[in-house]
Image (spheres, grey):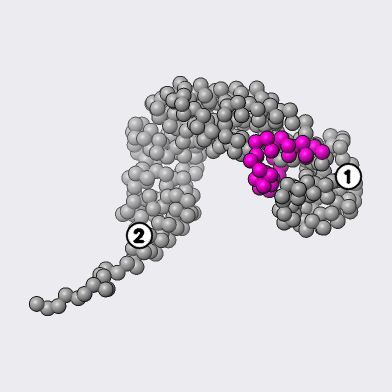
């Protein structure tokens, strides 16, 4: 895995213990707190105790631009409570030069639909917005590159927010990974007309795929091909794994597949079919798979039911046990019924429980129907 690139606006914005003082020349560290910063944060209703606990070093820095940063955020439409939350989570923002933040704002607005949406992004990903001004050229070049791919602006914005490192690095590295993904897509039989949609979906679901070495993707696809997966099945896996295929390696996949086949007691062809329906089996470690198989089997669920609905393996043992007990109170026995009812998000499960509750409460006869008299 590539080393994560630091994303603070300037070197001083990083944790003090992580860097020697002489590597943070743009700020001065004082033994006492900068009272102007503390008072300005108090005026903005920022949780000072939280700042002291998590990033107290910021309060010892000078100069600081607390009011200027708050004013800039307010001009963008951020409310007082939002500004307070941003500065509580990412107080190093107050150490950033307002002119550089303005330049960053203009850069983001080239792909962000509105200032209101940008404020929402900053609230969720403050460290992504307050990045080093030294990366502006790389950011600008990468934005232009992804726009040249005709990617949706919202996708580009999401990439910048959730994986800022990919925009801070030289454009050539992103070009190489995207080209590798496109070549793999074509070689596996993907249709050219669907290339853009496929790439957008993959990058949206796993932005960090850009940070992986391209050769990892090749090695993993070759391994899976040797395991008997067809080109169409490999394309399906590459799409459904949401880019996780770049986070795997042949050794780990071999151990996982070997364990799964022994635990299930199936043939290689049957295992491939199960993996296609539940790609998670490729990247869960043996220890996690062992725990989840044990939890399901100890609940009285047969292996045949598990392999019929293998996606149940994506749920933790704690969640499975809770859902089994909840269903039991509604009169549903997972040992004899389908495990599909266990699957899905919390909302999906609650919907299924609601349907079971209605079915349980439904009267066995129509109370308004006229009673049939004796002949």
Q: Give the number of the disc on residue 62.
A: 1
Q: Position of residue 295 (x, y in %)?
A: 43, 51
CA neighbours of label 1 inside 10 A, class few (<14), some (14 to 19), many (20+): some
Whether 100 is among the magenta residues is yes
Out of 327 and 177, give the one closest to the viewer: 177
Q: Is residue 161 above or below residue 334?
A: above
Decide if residue 202 is on the left or right side of residue 40: left
Q: Secondary structure at mark 2?
A: loop
Q: Residue at coordinates 80% horizontally, 37% vertically from top-left?
A: 100
Q: Is residue 53 above or below residue 358?
A: above
Tell me where residue 278 sits by quadrant. top left
Q: Secondary structure at mark 1?
A: strand
Q: Residue at coordinates 78% horizontally, 58% vertically from top-left?
A: 45
Q: Is residue 179 visible?
A: yes
Q: Give the number of the disc on residue 332.
A: 2
Query: Bounds of the magenta span?
Result: 99-128
Q: Position of residue 52 (x, y in %)?
A: 79, 53
Circles 1 and 2 in contact, beta carbons < 8 Å: no
Quarter placement of the N terminus: top right
Secondary structure mostly taken by the magenta-highlighted segment of the chain: helix
Q: Residue at coordinates 32% horizontally, 67% vertically from top-left?
A: 362
Q: Residue furthest bottom?
A: 374
Whether 14 is among the magenta residues is no
Decide if residue 166 is on the left or right side of residue 342: right
Query: How many labels were placed on the picture?
Result: 2
Q: Residue at coordinates 78% horizontally, 46% vertically from top-left?
A: 72
Q: Give the number of the disc on residue 34.
A: none
Q: Position of residue 272 (x, y in %)?
A: 38, 33
Tell me where residue 157 sits by quadrant. top right
Q: Nearer the viewer, mark 1 or mark 2?
A: 1
Q: Residue furthest left?
A: 375
């Amino acid at each position: 895995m590539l080393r994560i690139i630091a994303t603070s606006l300037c070197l001083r914005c990083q944790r003090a213990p992580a860097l020697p003082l002489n590597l943070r020349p743009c700020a001065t560290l004082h033994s006492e707190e900068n009272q102007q910063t503390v008072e300005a944060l108090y005026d903005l209703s920022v949780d000072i105790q939280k700042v002291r606990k998590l990033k107290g070093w910021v309060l010892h820095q000078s100069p600081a631009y607390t009011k200027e940063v708050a004013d800039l955020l307010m001009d963008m439409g951020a409310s007082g409570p939002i500004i307070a939350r941003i500065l509580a989570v990412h107080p190093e923002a107050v150490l950033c030069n307002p002119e550089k933040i303005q330049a960053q704002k203009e850069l983001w607005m080239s792909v962000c639909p509105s200032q209101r949406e940008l404020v929402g992004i900053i609230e969720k990903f403050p460290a992504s917005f307050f990045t080093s001004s030294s990366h502006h050229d790389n950011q600008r070049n990468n934005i232009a590159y992804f726009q040249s791919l005709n990617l949706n602006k919202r996708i580009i914005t999401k990439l910048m927010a959730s994986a800022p490192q990919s925009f801070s690095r030289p454009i050539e590295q992103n070009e190489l990974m995207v080209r590798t993904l496109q070549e793999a897509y074509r070689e596996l039989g993907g249709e050219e007309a669907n290339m853009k949609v496929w790439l957008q979906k993959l990058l949206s679901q796993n932005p960090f795929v850009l940070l992986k070495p391209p050769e990892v993707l090749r090695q993993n696809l070759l391994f899976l091909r040797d395991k008997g997966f067809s080109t169409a099945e490999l394309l399906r896996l590459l799409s459904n794994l949401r880019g996780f295929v770049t986070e795997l390696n042949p050794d780990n996949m071999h151990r996982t597949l070997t364990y799964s086949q022994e635990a299930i007691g199936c043939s290689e062809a049957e295992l491939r079919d199960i993996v296609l329906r539940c790609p998670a089996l490729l990247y869960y470690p043996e220890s996690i798979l062992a725990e989840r198989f044990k939890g399901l089997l100890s609940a009285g669920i047969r292996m045949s039911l598990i392999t019929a609905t293998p996606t149940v393996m994506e749920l933790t043992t704690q969640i499975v046990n809770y859902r089994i007990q909840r269903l039991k109170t509604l009169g549903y026995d997972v040992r004899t019924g389908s495990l599909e009812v266990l699957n899905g998000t919390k909302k999906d499960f609650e919907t299924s429980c609601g349907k079971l509750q209605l079915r349980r409460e439904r009267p066995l006869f129509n109370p308004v129907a006229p009673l049939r008299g004796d002949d």
